[in-house]
Amino acid sequence: MELGRFYAVWERFCASGTPLPATDDPSYVSAEPWMPVRSGCSGSKGGVAFSHETSTDWPRLFARLRPTGARASFGVVPGPITRYQPFAIARWQGEPSFDVHSGEVRRDVSIYPWWNHWPTAFEPSNGRYALAADRASHSSLTHMRWKEIAKTRDSVTKVHLEGMSEAGDAALASLARSWESPAVLKVESPGYSGGDYDPGERAWIVERSAAAGTEPLAFTLAASPASPVENIAVVVKGWGDGGATLTLDGREVASGKDFRVGHHRRLEATDLVVFVTARATSPLRLVLARR
């Protein structure tokens, strides 16, 4: 949802004396030609980036919006406030849906629903209306609903991606595709197995057996436009305490910002965790050698 230069427009609106309507009916049309805003969702479907948006004026900001086929919800307050765009992405497998929050608007106080925010507001305040801009507060602009990835008698597990980015819709759609339709990993080295992608870890999981000895781990990632690679995370279970060197498409990659390793120590064994900065829409070949 693009709110435009909110503060400037809101001050103009207040100074105009134009009354705010007592309704959130999306059929309502304001008599004032205020700066339009965009409310909508963007994402990917069938490997194609798309955007669904609706123009509206300020009094109609909270009109319900239920686009179909969306994978992600994007929002931004541009200009001097921030250059980063908050986003949330759910996998298509979770059948996500989005709408714009339209409840609890007190027009005499704010054009947005507005609550105090715990813990920086000093007291438990979930659902407690904010009355003045004298402390940290929060609002609700949109809802995202999607199915769980796992469920037991006592628990429900859901996963989604959330963050802030300067990237546009197309780049975020590529990020979504890399997660919901990950490139297939094929293990080439004896003594290693697996290669399935764990969306909860956003990583490929490989198992190392004792038969691997000192054999390096070689594998390919079948990246494509429909299954792009947006950075690589690999967990090698049973690797041990040793480090690793990386060769990517025949080129040695030095340890540093673009190639990092760590270890996850379990009671049974120690796993190697590898992160590689890489973007690709064509196959990649990686070799991890023990160090």
Image (cartoon, rainbow, N blue to C red):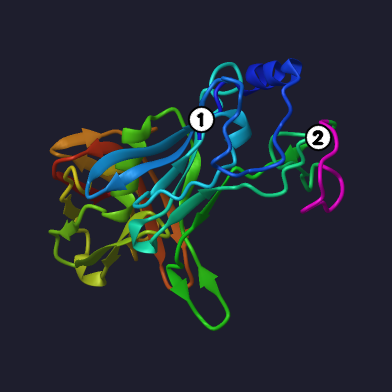
For label 1, the residue is 2
Q: Position of residue 33 (x, y in %)?
A: 56, 19
Residue found 76% across the figure and 44% down from its top: 115
Please state the extent of the stretch shown in magenta in the rendering: 121-133
Residue 23: image x %, image y %?
67, 43
Please identify, in this view, whether the residue under mark 2 or under mark 1 is nearer the observer.
2
Q: Is 291 rendered above or below residue 191?
A: above
- Main secondary structure along the magenta-highlighted residues: loop
Q: Can residue 229 be seen in this view?
A: yes
Return the mark for residue 53.
none
- The amino acid type of the residue labelled 2 equals Asp
Say which residue label 2 marks: 108
Q: Where is residue 225 in the image (x, y as percent from the top left)?
A: 18, 42
* Residue at image coords 48%, 76%: 151
Q: Nearer the viewer, residue 284 or 184?
A: 184
User: Label 2: how many residues lie within 10 Å, few (<14), some (14-19) or many (20+)?
Assistant: few
Q: Name the side, left or right, on which 187 lies relative to 203.
A: left
Q: Distance between the residues labelled 2 and 1?
A: 23 Å
Residue 235, x across and y down, in percent: 35, 57
Earlier along the polypeptide chain: callout 2 or callout 1? 1
